Amino acid sequence: MRRNSILVLLSVLLVSACGDSTDPGDASPDSEAVLADNVALVEDDGVLTLEAVVDSTYTYSFDGDDHGLAVGDVLYSATESSAYLRKVTSLADQDGMVIVETTDASFAEVILQGGFELQTTLTPALMAEQRHAFEKAVDGVFIDDHGVLHMSDVTLVDESTYSLVMTHAAASFESVLDCYATWDGGIETFGTIYTGTLSLACGLEATAAASVDEGGEILLGELPFPVIWATVPGLPILIPVEPVLSFRAGYTIHCSAQGSISTGVTNQTSLTVGARYDRLTGWVPAWEPSQTLVPDPFDWDASGEALIRAYIEPRFSLRIAWTAGPYVAVDPYLQLELDVDTESAAWALNAGVESRLGMEVTILDHTLADYSMTLTNDMLTILEGSLDFDDTVPIDLIQVYDSVTGLADSPFLDQTVTIEGVITVPPGTYNSFGHAIVDDTGGMEFWLENSSLLLGDRVRITGTVWVYTGAASENIQLADATAELIAHGSPPAPIVLSVMEIAGDHENVGSLVETSGIFRHHPDHRFEFYVDDGDASVLVYIDPTTWIDFSGFSDGDPINVVGVCRNYAGTPEIVPRWSADLR
């Protein structure tokens, strides 16, 4: 009887994720790939063609006089569109077809010895394509068009005497997955390594009315990725690897504090995380994090002692060949320690990254002993101090606009904040109460009545973040402001930018900018003109209260413009302060 079976002996070299020839994750270069001799491969151009499937009954047409099947054979489809693995229990020939009764089979009956390696990029774009498959577990959670998970007012815990709420969060994990394995009567080597960038921005609010000692975790949602097919070198076999990305949020509260506490952080971490296994040396973890942190404003109205810790955890789990596989969880966390009594207050806002590995791996019926480990890096203190801490907020954290629509998107909307910087627009420039200020990160306008501030004054301004929406614009400003003069000083220099840098980016809204190009008049508005440098153009608006006369400029004249950058109808524009800003 002609058998549709293959025996292949091929030397296969598997390279570990790190590529270090001395690494225990390296497979032996002498590994051989061996297929069992009772395997019948169903291929697109093979002898057998699948015609129908009803439960466990498979019907095939076949080329030639003999289908080549026997009871005990293992049917394996090597096509991604119809992958299956079935053992033949009985056969019946009928009208040129063969009707095959089957039962479940396992890869261990197919591949006696071999290995695979897989490298793929799990990108936010791929996450975005899979948004329809996202299964959220709580309200206030969604994945946006860029593959970023968002949370809004998600309650981590709500009891009668305490609560903890994630007021906002955005988390993403873009990584390259390296997964490999070799086996010969058992697993010889195995590795799962993720290398990529983890981003998290979140805010936290806690309230307590009594002593608390509590911790917990909630599932936010799961996102399955499309099946990835790993090849076994030397064999016409595909092994399915199914990644699933889940998001969890967890917390720990130990406190005797009474009152409320709010804070947050923006954390971006470059990392390599995972583990490698070698039969001779056992498990070796991989852990190389490098993070940058920016704190949110910190506010409390509490007394007592508190330690509050919260995290959002992206966790990648793999199912290899339809069996349980490893998971790698990465926890960027925020930890607040507070000690307040009647005389003093001390506090520290810390952040860090932890990883939890779980390697319960079964490949081709070969099982590794369970392996789990928690990896930590040094916890970083990003803010600390006492009651007289500096509560100023960098302006660029307040001045946030949607990069596509230009709409205001400040995380501080309706909050009272304090900023510190140098005056670029004193009162009386545009009107009696309008001002502008810059710090090292950006600039913004504020409203202050009865002001005597001068150009170049260094001041602390406290006010409420709001969005000015007049004249088809959305500009983030401070309203109801108060001012504390620190020192008189020199006028700050404008930021020199190209026309494209101003017109194409809302990052400079509120700042004092300078650009140059060719004058071009506005056909419909006598208080506006354009500056064009050949690559882009930007609108210049002359506030009538400034009495700036630009009638001396004609189309095609070179012009240099200084002014405050504003957001007009979703597009940046420049508003000069006085005649000397045009030359």
Image (cartoon, helix red, strand yellow):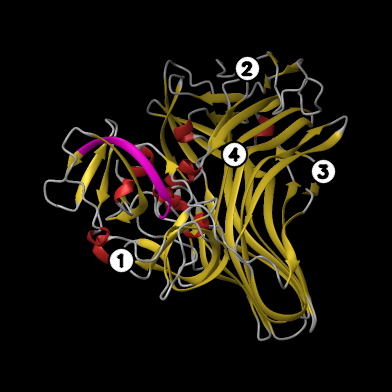
Residue at image coords 47%, 46%: 493
Question: Is 409 placed left or right of 345 in the picture?
Answer: left
Q: Which one is in front, 360 or 425? A: 425
Residue at image coords 64%, 50%: 315
In the picture of the structure, the residue carrying the numbered disc 4 is: 175
Please identify the quarter of the rendering in which residue 535 is found: top left
In the picture of the structure, the residue carrying the numbered disc 3 is: 369
Give the vertical position of 488 relative to 57 (above or below). below
- Frontmost of labels 4 and 2 is 4
| Circle nearer the N terminus (4, 3) | 4
| Circle nearer the N terminus (2, 1) | 2
Q: Which one is in front, 545 or 292? A: 545
Dot 4 lies on which element?
strand
Residue at image coords 61%, 46%: 198
Q: Quadrant of the N terminus?
A: top right
Q: Inspect the image, locate mark 2, and give the three-letter code of the amino acid beneath it.
A: Gly
In the picture of the structure, the residue carrying the numbered disc 2 is: 234
Question: Is 5 placed left or right of 150 in the picture?
Answer: right
In the picture of the structure, the residue carrying the numbered disc 1 is: 469
